[in-house]
Amino acid sequence: MPIIMRNTVKISILLLAFTAMSCRELPDYLVGDNVVARVGREDLTREDIAQLIPAGVTGEDSVAFAKACVDKWFVRQLKIEEAEALFPESEHDIEKLVEDYRQSLLTSRVDQYYIDKQMDKTVTDEQVAEYYNAHKADFTLDRTLVKGRVLRFDAAYRQSKKLKEQMQKAATSADAEKTFSDVCEKQGFQLIDNRSEWINFSDFLANLPVLAAKDNEPLLDKLGIQEMKMGKDSYYFDFTSVCRKGNVAPLEVVADNIRRILLTRRRAEVIKQHEEQIFQSAQAEGRLRRFGEEAVEQPDSLQ
């Protein structure tokens, strides 16, 4: 330990015989002193320890936990004293940071209070669509999205032609869809159906024997069921919808993002309205004074 620490730090454990901790109490013969431990001029009290002991911890477990709490507190206080000795000039900066943080927490709690009290957190589909239609330029795709299906089956399957016809019909009726699904399940074929959601073109191609999306853009131009084969596997696949890179993203892809945007705007509006209200009230009551007002401009948010 540095010399300065040896000269200034005096540690004493005044109380460590904790019993009946489930009731947050100490033995009767120890109740007279509230201090449990001390480092220099800093004290740790029975109340401090009691707040740290989890409910239900009793007996030897509570004593061990309490001792661990005291040891941890010792180390923390020693590090604080060492920091004060090593960096005496930073005390003011730290105090300012702590005060700034305290004020930030308080103002944030005020903001959240009025947000919880006043803000409508419901965002309807109509509001999402309205925002989408008014800001389509903000939702340009940086990648190609597709909807479609990929079927992988045994290249030796003798009824592959009929299978292709069943796959085509499956897109037109529920009965045909069930027949096609039943065949795939019975034969152990892998059917990946992404017709109900948009996925990246590259993710779609990951289910096919191809290498890179950029080399397979021509696949997007073809209609109907396409075929591929590699080794013992054959593939049927089709695209039911395509939205290329550079186009406006489909509404369903950006709907959640729009909801977040609208809620963020509402939060800002609630905060701004409250700030204006308390500013105007305080001004009307004469509680605000400016010194050298000619050199001070009113904040833009409150004009």
Image (tube, grey):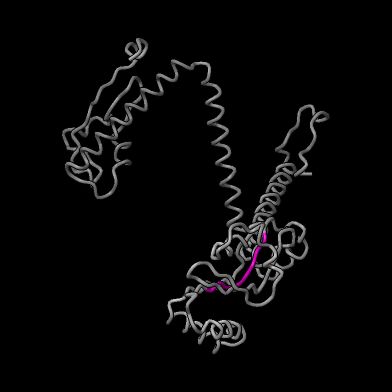
Please identify the quarter of the rendering in which residue 285 is found.
top right
Is 88 placed above or below 24 here? above
The residue that appears at 67% across and 67% down in the rendered structure is: 219
Quadrant, the N terminus: top left
Front residue (pair 168, 68):
168
Is 255 placed above or below 33 here? below
Front residue (pair 91, 263):
263
| 41 sits to left or right of 118 | left
Quadrant, the C terminus: top right
Q: Can you name the residue that lies furthest to the right here?
A: 294
Q: How many labels does the image show?
A: 0
Q: Main secondary structure of the magenta part?
A: strand
Q: Position of residue 229 (x, y in %)?
A: 55, 70
The residue that appears at 51% across and 84% down in the rendered structure is: 159
Front residue (pair 78, 184):
184
In the image, is residue 92 part of the stretch drawn in magenta? no
Segment tinted magenta in the rendering:
144-151
Is 55 placed above or below 259 here? above
Front residue (pair 280, 10):
10
The residue that appears at 40% across and 19% down in the rendered structure is: 82
Q: Where is residue 239 in the image (x, y as percent from the top left)?
A: 64, 72
Q: Where is residue 139 in the image (x, y as percent from the top left)?
A: 72, 58
In the image, is residue 150 part of the stretch drawn in magenta? yes
Q: Position of residue 123 (x, y in %)?
A: 64, 66
| 47 sits to left or right of 187 | left
